[in-house]
Image: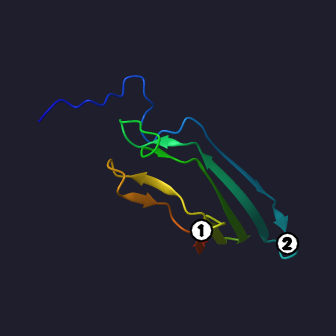
Amino acid sequence: YGPYLATSDGGNNLYAPEFSFTAGAEYLFELPNGAFLTPRINYAWVDEQWTSLLYNPTTDLLDSRGLWSALITYEQDDWKVQGYVRNLTDKEYITGQNLDANTEYYGAPRTIGVDVSYQF
């Protein structure tokens, strides 16, 4: 084996975006039966990220991305029902890749679901 020629001296940490932020808005509605209904919208943004110590901008840099999600929660007494949509716009994005850039790992597509809980 020969010496490894790549160096991270002064380079960014891998998979560590310089900036990221999240924001959300919700409104609580009190219903006539004493229950609560809360719609919520969220946005999360992640800056571009390096995936290799070679720091090649063509093959080793993931694009920044922003994802929307939405929730609606119904709460009454000890019951809670929450419907959600993650990746609301069904954005296709890459979350990682192999060092040789021949393999890419995609983020989750739009996901729709319901959570139900009861507090004892």
Q: Could you tell me which residue is drawn at 71 percent across and 68 percent down? A: 73
Between 109 and 50, the one nearer to me in the picture: 50
Q: Quadrant of residue 43?
A: bottom right
Q: Could you tell me which residue is drawn at 11 percent across and 36 percent down? A: 1
Horizontal side of 111 relative to 27 (left or right) equals: left
Report the Cα–Cα distance between label 2 and label 1: 20 Å
Say the numbered circle drawn on residue 95.
Answer: none
Q: Residues within 10 Å of mark 2 (few under 14, many from 20)?
A: few
Using the image, determine if residue 66 lies above or below residue 47. below
Residue 82, position in %: x, y? 65, 71
Mark 1 belongs to which amino acid? Gln
Using the image, determine if residue 112 lies above or below residue 100. below
Residue 114, position in %: x, y? 60, 75
Do the CB atoms of the residues marked 2 and 1 lie less than 8 Å apart? Answer: no
Say the numbered circle drawn on residue 119.
Answer: 1
Between 89 and 26, the one nearer to me in the picture: 89
User: Which secondary structure, mark 1?
Assistant: loop
Between 65 and 102, the one nearer to me in the picture: 102
Between 41 and 100, the one nearer to me in the picture: 100
Q: Is residue 5 visible?
A: yes
Mark 2 belongs to which amino acid? Leu
Q: Could you tell me which residue is drawn at 69 percent across and 64 percent down? A: 70
> For mark 2, what is the residue?
31
Q: Where the C terminus falls, by quadrant?
A: bottom right
Q: Residues within 10 Å of mark 1 (few under 14, many from 20)?
A: few
Q: Nearer the viewer, mark 2 or mark 1?
A: 2
Counting residues from the N terminus, which is met first, the one under dot 2 or under dot 1?
2
Horizontal side of 86 relative to 55 (left or right) equals: right
